Image: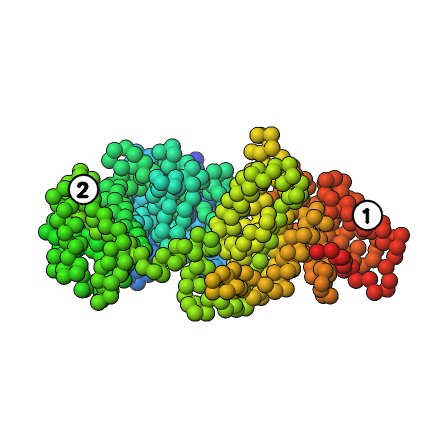
Amino acid sequence: MPDSTETESTERRQPERATDTLGKRLRHAEMLLDVHTRLAAMDTLDDALEELVTIASRETGSDRVTLFLNDEETGELYSRVALGKIRREIRVLNSTGIAGHVFSSGESMIIHDAYSEPHFNRAVDEQTGYETRNIMCTPIRTVKGETIGVAQCLNKKRGQFSEENLTVLKAMTLQASITLNSAQFAERMQKSRELEREFLDIVSDVTSEIDLGVVLQKVMDEAARMLNAERSTLFLNDEKTGELWSEVGVGLDAVPIRFPNHLGIAGVVFNSGKSINIPYAYADLRFNPEFDHKTGYFTRSILCVPVVNTHGKTIGVTQVLNKHGGAFTDEDESRLRAFTAQVSIGLENAKLFNDIHNMKNYNESMLESMSNGVITLDEDGRIVTCNAAGRRILKVTATDIIGSFAEDFFKDSNSWVMEKIHCLDETQQAELVMDADIEAGGTPVSVNVTVLPLLSAGQERLGTLIMIEDISTEKRVKATMARYMDPGLANQMLEEGTEILGGKSTPATVLFSDIRGFTTLTEELGAQGTVALLNEYFSIMVDCIQREEGMLDKFIGDAIMAAFGMPIPRDDDEDRAVRAAIAMIKSLQEWNSTRLDHGKKPVDMGIGLNTDVIVSGNIGSPKRMDYTMIGDGVNLAARLESACKYYAARILISENTYRKLHGTYRIREIDRVVVKGKTEPVAIYEVLDYHSEESFPNFMEVVLYFKDGLGYYRSGNWSRAIAAFTEALKLHPADRLTQMYIERCEHLVDHPPGDDWNGVWVMASK
């Protein structure tokens, strides 16, 4: 039995404990009421968070308190920190760290030793210098039990965090959750309204612009900013070329881009009409990293949507790259689709205006570049346009003629032009005057004049068009000369005037070509057959030369002599000559295929190229002259053409040409020779670009073995040279050049050269 003293003491403590408990409950209720009252007075989410942090820090005795709210779109927990007047937002994934673990698991944590907790990330302490000792963390739940964030307290100022502290923090966050949830919702609604208002302003701004370049730039600026992306590009479809193109791009410094409209992510979206959202670009097989490799840019995420006009036709695609803070969301896709749908009208209007503007510029450029004068009159007979050729022929300025009435301009000795205009008005039939004289600047000029009605697409009369062709002496002479020589050469000769028989030295690349076995062909074909064959052959070969702007010098029997770099030199004359030679061989192969189909024999040929300073000019008398080229450079080109037979080659070029090439070609060095009539050796190379895998199998391996063999050959190591050449021949048994070198090495083994051997071959014939 307890004594009476203990019983009395226990009875006294029970009311005291009841009083303490009641007091705690009252303070707890007052605190929660204070939380509710204070948060209800807050206008914004930032203010509510700041106030709740202050109360939580005080009530739990924490050194630091951080409130994280969940962003459902990005899967991140975010907290806002005030730094003076600036508010900074901190974001972490809602599955990492202690906060992420508490949010994901929904379970509160009290950690007495932060550094022993596996979920704790000590890197933050190391970066900031702050030392975290203990942590209390609990989910922020609504009254419905939905977790909307996390409350985290660091470093209890006195002692350790207790269950009582956790109970207070839970009750506080539960009380605040209604306000936080409402403030979060209000903030999203406010942001949504601002975005919608901004969206409408952007659409209005873009659709009011008519210049395509400006429209494209505005669309891209706003698309990148609206979706918080690093880069954006709008590709429009070019129906003429089947390409997607763009000339602007945020962050791209307006790099012009064109590619077939079926390639890449943009091509897939354009053809399917469906959006593509790729969170990890390099993990998607449709992504082409080539552009990244060229520019050094790293593409992380891609959102690409079709641009569809009001008729449901896809006219392009919009592509945005690398959203800041994560991947693009479904909401981003919806906003971008809505944006492009709204601006598509503006884009089409701007594109139509751009097409019309380009057409206008094209027509004006075409008129200005015409050699014939073109003059247009409106319905009242006022001169509206006169191109450069017209002003030159009539010896007037634009001010002298534009805006004048035709009857005031074409008067006196030129009044016959007005007569033709009046006849046109009456008959509506074109009027043509040949070889007439028109006075220009007090001097008669021989012209052909055509007067035509100017009609609209609906065949309505808009005015009159006058075309004037200058047929003065110079033009007649030029036309006559152009029949038998290159038009550029004809211009040069006319400009030289009295120096027409003179010559000059100029660097050029000379091309010689010759048909193999031509004598045998002539015997089989006869005179008429030979002429027909040559005409067809020369037509094909001359086209190849003139496509590369080469100058055809002359035909010498079945041979062709041409030059590149005359009369107008270019930086890539050597490349033009090589490309022309390759085209000649390929065209010959196609022609031979046709000949074989018709039961005719194929034609073979050789081509020699050399670059050097040559003498060019007209040789002859004033009554009969011939333009020609002479010099050692010309002779070497002819020798190389002849050497094609010896080396079983079709195109040989000298080292002079080889060293000046800018392009990349399939070429191998084949020898160093001293041609007939010379003492200095020259390296010669064989061009093999006309070959296919069937006609020259294992190209790279053969060339490498051949190069090794040539090196051993020149050093006098005949056995190793034969071994290398033999390996090359195994890979390409039809390579007659390799076989020739094996035979040459075997001859040198039996007849060793002297100590002065340097690998140079002396050609005994031309």
- Number of disc labels: 2
| Image quadrant in which the C terminus is located | bottom right
Could you say which quadrant of the image residue 279 lies in? top left
The residue positioned 32% from the left and 44% from the top of the image is: 173
Residue depth check, mark 1 versus mark 2: number of the one nearer the observer: 2
Name the amino acid type tagged 2: Gln
Q: Residue at x 14, y 53 (%)?
A: 418
In the rendered image, the quadrant that contains the N terminus is top left
- The residue wearing badge 2 is 429
Q: Give the Cα distance between marks 1 and 2.
A: 78 Å
Say few, some or many: other residues with alpha carbon within 10 Å of mark 1 (under 14 / 14 to 19 / 20 or more). Answer: few
Side (left or right) of 624 relative to 735: left
Task: Identify which residue, 177 or 482, lies in the foreground.
Answer: 482
Residue at image mark 1: 743
Compare marks 1 and 2 and give the one earlier in the sequence. Answer: 2
In x, y percent, where is residue 652? 65, 52
**Quarter assignment of residue 427:** top left
- Three-letter amino acid code at disc 1? Glu
Q: Position of residue 662 (x, y in %)?
A: 55, 57
User: Which label is found at residue 613?
Assistant: none
Q: Position of residue 112 (x, y in %)?
A: 48, 49
Compare residues 432 and 527 and report the one nearer the observer: 527
Element at label 2: loop
